[in-house]
Image (cartoon, helix red, strand yellow):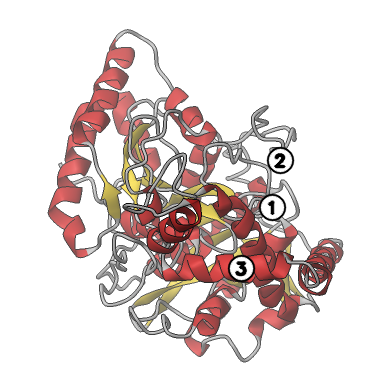
Amino acid sequence: MDVRKLTLKQAIDGLSAGTFSAEELARSWLTTIRESDSALNSFVTLDEEYTLAQAREADRKRTSGEVLPLAGVPVAYKDIFCTQGLKTTACSKILGNFVPPYESTVTQKLKEAGAICLGKTNMDEFAMGSSNESSFFGPARNPWDTDRVPGGSSGGSAAAVAAGLAPAALGTDTGGSIRQPAAFCGITGMKPTYGRVSRRGIIAFASSLDQAGPMTRTAEDAAILLNHMCGRDPWDSTSSSEAVPDFTAELANSLKGKVLGLPKEYFAGELDSGIADALDAARKVLEQMGVTFREISLPHTHLAVPAYYVIAPAEASANLARYDGVRFGYRCENPQNLDDLYTRSRAEGFGEEVKRRILVGTYALSAGYYDAYYRKAQQIRRLIRDDFLKAFEEVDAIFCPTTPDVAFRLGEKTDDPVKMYQEDLFTIPVSLAGLPALSMPCGLVNGLPAGVQLVAPHFEESRLLNIAHQFQTETDWHTLQPGQKGA
C-alpha cells in the first residue's frame, strides 16, 4: 500500500470504512520511512514495536466497538515533545539518552483520541534555529531539493509530511518554527494563539513564546488535529481557559465579505519577487471568492527581530540553566570539582547556536543591562501587539508572506547568524503578539514552494482555517509533492 498521498482525513476515513487496519497503515508508513528517509534525515527516533503495539491496540478497540476519533492514525512528533518510554532529546547531545517518565499534555490528548506515535522528528537543537542545521543528529533536508534546508526549527516534521512519510506531524513555534518550514516544504502549518495548547511536557525554549501546533497537507487536516490538542491544563498556568470550538465547523463557510489586511511593511524590499508574484496570484483567487483587501500598517515591524533576539535568548538562558550535568542528561567525564562539572558538561553538551543564545540572554538579564535590553524589548513587544490589535479593528485577518525567500541551500547562512535570524522577519512579530497564524502553500518559485501567511485575532484559529480551506478548494498547491509542477 502506497500511503504517501494519504491525507489525515483520508486515513481516518479508510480506517473507519475498514479499507485497512491501523496495523497495516502503521507498517506501510514505517516501511516508507525505512526506504526513503535516509535522503532526508527527517526522523531521529523510530521504535517500530512501540508504534505497532499502539496500532494493534487501536485495532482491538475498534473491533470491540470502542471507536475513538483518531483511532489508528499515525502522527509524527517533533523531538521536543516528551513521550513516555520513547527517547526525547530536543536533538541535543546534552539530552542524548533522555527517556521521559511521562507524556506531554498534547501528545497525551492525541493518544487518548486514538492517535499513534509514528516516531520523533529532527529539529534545530532546543528549537533554536531557522534551518534545522543545528541538530546534533545532522540537518534534515528539504524533499523538494535535498541540497536545501527544510526550515527550522520544526524542519523534520515539515520534511516528513511533505515527502509523504507521515500524514501529519506536530511542531512547535517560538518565532516561526512551524510556519517557516511549512512554507519551505509546501505544507500547511499552524501556530495557535499563545496558551491555546498546553506547554506541559514540551522541552522549553522561551516560555512566553513557545506554542505547539499541527503540520499537515491541508487546512482540513490541521483543523482535525487541532480539535484534539487544545484546552485548559491545570499543569500549565499559561494555558488558556478559553472555550475550544470545533475547528472543522466553519471550514465550509463562504468568504464573501471578508476583509484581509495587506501590511505594507511586509511587502517591502526584503521580499523575493517570485514570492511576491505567488502572493499576488493567491490574492486574485481570494478576490474571486468575494474577499476584499485593504492596505494596513504595522509600524513597529522593523523592531520585532531585535526585540525577539533579546527576549527569547533571555528566557532560554533561564530555562536551560537546569542542564548542569547533575540531575539528568549529559555529564562530562572525570570532573575535577563542581565548577568543572558544570562548565564542561554544558560546554560539551550544547551546540554553538544554543551556547550563543545562552550567552546573549544571560548578558541581557545581567545587572546594569536588564533595563537597557530586556525591559526595552518587552516594551517594544507591547507596541507590536498594539499594532496588530489596531489593525484588527479594520480587517478580519491579515494576508502576508511567510518568508522573505524560498528555501536556501545548506550551509548558505550558517556563518552569518544575523542573516539567518532575518529569515524569521515576517513570523516573529506574530509570535511576539501571541496571535494565531497559518502558513499554506500558494505557488512554486523556480520549482520550490512559496507560502502565504494568514494572521487572525487571538483565539480566532477557526477564521484562519476557514480561509485556508476555501483557498485550497480552489487551488492545488497543497496537493503537490516534491517533483510535481502544479497547475
* Quadrant of the snapshot with the C terminus: bottom left
Q: Where's residue 376, x and y in %?
A: 82, 71
Front residue (pair 342, 418): 342
Q: Residue at x 47, y 60 (%)?
A: 343
Tell me the mark number nearer the camera, choosing from 3 and 1.
1
Calculate the distance from the C-alpha at mark 2 to the C-alpha at mark 1: 8 Å
Residue density around tag 1, few if under 14, some if 14–19, many if 20 or more, within 10 Å: some
The quarter holding residue 132 reads bottom left
SS class, disc 2: loop
N-term-proximal mark, 2 vs 3 = 2
The correct choice, above or below, for 192 with respect to 424 in the image is above
Q: Residue furthest bottom?
A: 269
Calculate the distance from the C-alpha at mark 3 to the C-alpha at mark 1: 16 Å
Residue density around tag 3, few if under 14, some if 14–19, many if 20 or more, within 10 Å: many
Q: Where's residue 364, x and y in %?
A: 71, 69
SS class, disc 3: loop
For disc 2, the marked residue is 238
N-term-proximal mark, 2 vs 1 = 1
Amino acid of disc 1: Ser
Calculate the distance from the C-alpha at mark 2 to the C-alpha at mark 3: 21 Å
SS class, disc 1: loop
The correct choice, above or below, for 419 with respect to 396 in the image is below
Q: Residue at x 34, y 70 (%)?
A: 486
Q: Are marks 3 and 1 in contact (CB under 8 Å)?
A: no
On the question of residue 205 being in view, the answer is yes
Q: Where's residue 337, x and y in %?
A: 45, 52
Q: Are marks 2 and 1 in contact (CB under 8 Å)?
A: yes
Q: Residue at x 20, y 49 (%)?
A: 33
Q: Residue furthest front?
A: 336
Front residue (pair 391, 338): 338
Q: Which mark is residue 427?
A: 3
